[in-house]
Amino acid sequence: MSLSEMVKRFKRYGLILMIILVATFMIGLFPLAQRISVYYSTTYVKQLKNFVNELIQRVSGQSQPALGIVVKRLTKNFIDVSTGVDLSGLLVYEDLPGLSRNPKGLFTYGSSAKFLLVDEPHILLIEIPSSLFERILSAEMAYVFLASSDGTIVVSNNMNLLGSKIYPKKGFSKIGSSVGYMQVEPIEPFKAFVCSFIPLNTYLVVLLPYFLVFIAALCGAAIWLTLAYSFENRFMTAMNLALENVNQSLSKLDKTEEVVYVPIETEITELNQLQNGIQRLIEAQKASWHELHAMMNNLQDTVNELEETQKVLQERNTQIIATLAEAIEIKDANTFGHSDHVVTLALDLAKELGLTDPADLEAIRFGALLHDIGKIGIPEHILNKPGRLTQDEYEIMKMHPIYGEKIVRKISGWDLVADIIRHHHENFDGSGYPDGLKGTQISLRTQIVGLVDVFSALIEDRPYRRALSVEEALRLMENEMVGTKFDPKLYEAFLRVLQRYIRRSSTRV
């Protein structure tokens, strides 16, 4: 028998059994369970509610009681007007109109439901004996009851429930040791509820025939699964033998040993055909192995050449960038060597702050090197002016970060570098230029380059002033710039870096 024929047969048997199982259970269980709920919950609750409302309306409008119902007029202190009997200790209530929580009859035999209504200047007591509820409370395998506002059961078809308390809420709940479904309907305007409770035992008893049918279908499915399991065992045994044979051949192939794959004969035709196909694939693999090995060697040589070319290109790019930075310093003769100085201190400060991302460090390196590249667009008479700049000249000078960003923005992958160049004159308090950024709006990379740029400029000669000593520069920065131009924490880290730098160089920075 072929594998496809065996699988089709098992699928056919399984499909029939599963349809019987699912159809029997779904068609019988859920509609009947719903019908049980409707029959016991909705029907009996509505009947009892209508019955209570009808009796109260009939009696409250008549002077003479009927059907064994007792009607009494009471004072506000619950004293019977006609007999003078004090009923305040027997009538328990919360709000009027309401249902008393005492199920024991006062003027009737047995238990009763006692409704209290306001009938100025008296209170009207309507006591309905439980005997009148018997035709409504005759439900079998379910509890039907009348409860006061606090959940005390006053009338019920189960006498053991009288006086006990429940939580009147629709849904599954627990009464005593029984768990079941509760249906609740309020009686307006009284603070009372009509409830029904269907124990789970009721569902089990009514649904027992359907469970039996389900079990029968389940047994049929179990028989089918047994047959399927038997087939699976035979199939897996043959498959494992074939896989073991294939794995042994592949293991030898990985070690470049000579492989001769011999298929194992099994009971499954398709599996035998699969092994024959594997045999042909292995033979083809053996034939192409040496060709693939030669291709890999050639590919490795190509990769090595590409890596070498990449190194050469990277070195050339670095040289071009260095040349560009030098061109800036040649135009602005007063800042010769300034960019190299900024690069060294900026990278040391970045490492002090824990920056380890290669992208961040590269951006800081090139951003520090080219931060003044935009000065190419500033006239030389402004760059080299021996005195202080006029306001108009200063506004022109403030354009060099924008020019610099436009130059490097066109270089692919230099977005971080462009950010440093544009914003290296932004201040911590937002008073810088060109965008007026403040605080964390300025990237840490940019803050690092900006701080080092200011320090380096202070200790270098300028046409309009002499170079400051390191001590003078630090004093000026602490008194006038920390907290305004720079983040105080960043400045503290810079001091640590500068001290180490001075110790290393053993000369004035």
Image (tube, grey):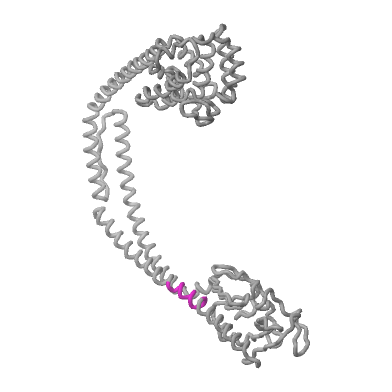
Q: Main secondary structure of the magenta part?
A: helix
Residue 327 % position (x, y): 38, 12
- Left or right placement of residue 152 versus residue 81 in this view: left
Front residue of this view, candidates 353 and 415? 415
Whether residue 444 sits left or right of residue 5 in the image: it is right
32 within the magenta span: yes
| Start-end of magenta stretch | 31-41
Number of numbered discs present?
0
For the N terminus, the image quarter is: bottom left
Instruction: Judge from the rendering whether residue 375 lies leftward or rightward of residue 82; answer left or right.
Output: left
Q: Residue furthest top?
A: 507
**Does the stretch in magenta take in 444?**
no
- Work out whether residue 186 or residue 437 is closer to the camera in this orientation and state it: 437
Q: Answer whether residue 160 is visible to the viewer in this image.
A: no
- Please, is residue 55 above or below residue 204 in the view? below
- Seen from the viewer's position, the closer of residues 477 and 83 is 477
**Residue 267 in the image: x percent, y percent?**
27, 50
Q: Is residue 82 left or right of residue 375?
A: right
- Residue drawn where x is 25% and y is 22% of the image: 298
Q: In this rendering, does residue 421 appear at all? A: yes
Instruction: Point out residue 281 in the picture as x, y percentages from the top left corner.
Output: 23, 37
Q: Quadrant of residue 28?
A: bottom left
Q: Position of residue 438 (x, y in %)?
A: 52, 30
